[in-house]
Image: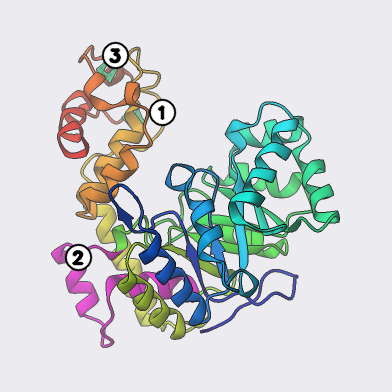
Amino acid sequence: MQYRTFGKTGFEPSALGFGAMRLPLKDGRIDDAEATRMVRHAIDRGVNYVDTAWVYHDGESESFLGRALADGYRERVKVATKMPCWKIERPEQLDEIFSQQLRNLRTDRIDCYLFHALSAGAWQKIKEVGALEWAEKKVARGQIGYLGFSFHDELPVLKTILDDYDQWVFCQLQYNYMDVRTQAGTEGVRLAARKGLAVIVMEPLLGGRLASPPPPAVGRLWESLPVRRSPADWALQWVWNQPEVSLLLSGMSAFAQVEQNLDSANRSAVGSLSAGELAVIDRVRETFVSLVPVPCTKCGYCQPCPHGVQIPDILDLYNLSVTYNNIAASRSSYDWIREEGRAHHCIACGQCEERCPQKIRIIEWLKKADKVLR
Ligand code: SF4
Ligand code: SF4
């Protein structure tokens, strides 16, 4: 296993972290035996960081991890979990949730604790309920090791969160070779690292999409390289190539994925990709962008739909499913869109199309999206 640096802490994380959000299932629930075998195998091969959250697997992931890390495995890893910021309305809830998380994880300390999915609104709210002071007390008492946050909002919001508070030790950002200008993007990753934070990368394969069999135009680009690697391996190496990255998380669903990711991590290093390889990855990105069917810029001018349809999110998922030829990943993400906001609630009133600056035939695309995503 390759080990890296974690901000200013002195902790040396494994290049690969185990994400417990896409564990293998049996009869619709976490397959305890197989998932435990995967987690323990990863730790036996050098992984020293495992990540979960209150909400993963409908609230079952933390408890699973508590069981999986028995028999001495807990002491061999840093455990990370997250405060579900959207649930917090009263200060007392912070302690209630945290105490339950300690019980779930069968531990008396969370090594790396994150405020989950900070956005502009969530940042305001956690400041107002005193969550930062609460977390600082937990750090002082040793119940939290390092304090951080995860993030899916846009770069200006990240800048605010980094500028407003100087006690962050780490952050967890969505980042992969397609997301260089979306969410935090390359600029956000570099900014956080410059401020001394450890940067944990999530979604290095864009929800598995970058591991899908590539469309022919992308496949030809990969084949043009003298070194043969899987699309997933190229995507992971691209992340590890960057000095700002402390580790990347992979949400592994099968034992074979654990083996593949361990193999990739063992070959990883900062600066390991050549200029030629990086240039081909740039062309892969451009090719994927050219394959996007709906030219939605996510400007949001079509919102709100009087019938509650979440137009930009749906068009985005449809674009992802077509571009990366991975319907399963987009269907899984579609579950996050509340039922009332889904495409089949469109009554074709046409108001959104009048407001769309890209002149997108939204009604027609929503019908297509409904067929693919439902
Ligand atoms: S056409 Fe459909 S999506 Fe657009 S505003 Fe009307 S109901 Fe909403
Ligand atoms: S107005 Fe058009 S471009 Fe903007 S989010 Fe809506 S569909 Fe996309």
Q: Is mark 1 within 8 Å of ligand 2?
A: yes
Q: Which of the two discs, 2 and 1, labels the residue nearer the N terminus?
A: 2
Residue found 75% across the figure and 30% down from its top: 128
Q: Earlier in the sequence, mark 1 or mark 3?
A: 1
Residue at left 20%, top 44%? Answer: 293
Quarter of the figure that contains the C terminus: top left
Callout 2: few (<14), some (14-19), or many (20+) C-alpha neighbours within 10 Å?
A: some
**Kind of residue at badge 2:** Pro
* Residue type, numbered disc 1: Gly
Is 59 one of the magenta-colored residues?
no
Looking at the rendered structure, the secondary structure element under dot 3 is: helix
Q: Position of residue 232 (x, y in %)?
A: 32, 70
Q: CA distance from mark 1 to mark 3?
A: 13 Å
Q: State which mark lies toward you, 2 or 3.
A: 2
- Residue topped by disc 3: 351
Find residue 49 and name its label.
none
The CA distance from mark 2 to mark 3 is 38 Å
Q: Amino acid type of disc 3?
A: Gln
Point out which mark residue 213 bears: 2
> Which of the two residues, 105 or 235, is positioned nearer the viewer here?
105
Q: Which residues are magenta?
A: 211-240
The disc placed on residue 300 is 1
Q: Please tell me which residue lies in front, 86 or 350.
A: 86
Q: 20 or 330, which is in the foreground? A: 20
Whether disc 2's CB lies below 8 Å from ligand 2 is answered no
Name the chief secondary structure element in magenta: helix
- Kindly tell me whether mark 3's CB lies below 8 Å from ligand 1: yes
Within-10-Å neighbours for mark 1: few <14, some 14–19, many 20+: some
Can the viewer see residue 120?
A: no
Residue at x 43%, y 56% (from the top left corner): 179
Question: Could you tell whether 362 is left or right of 308 in the image?
Answer: left
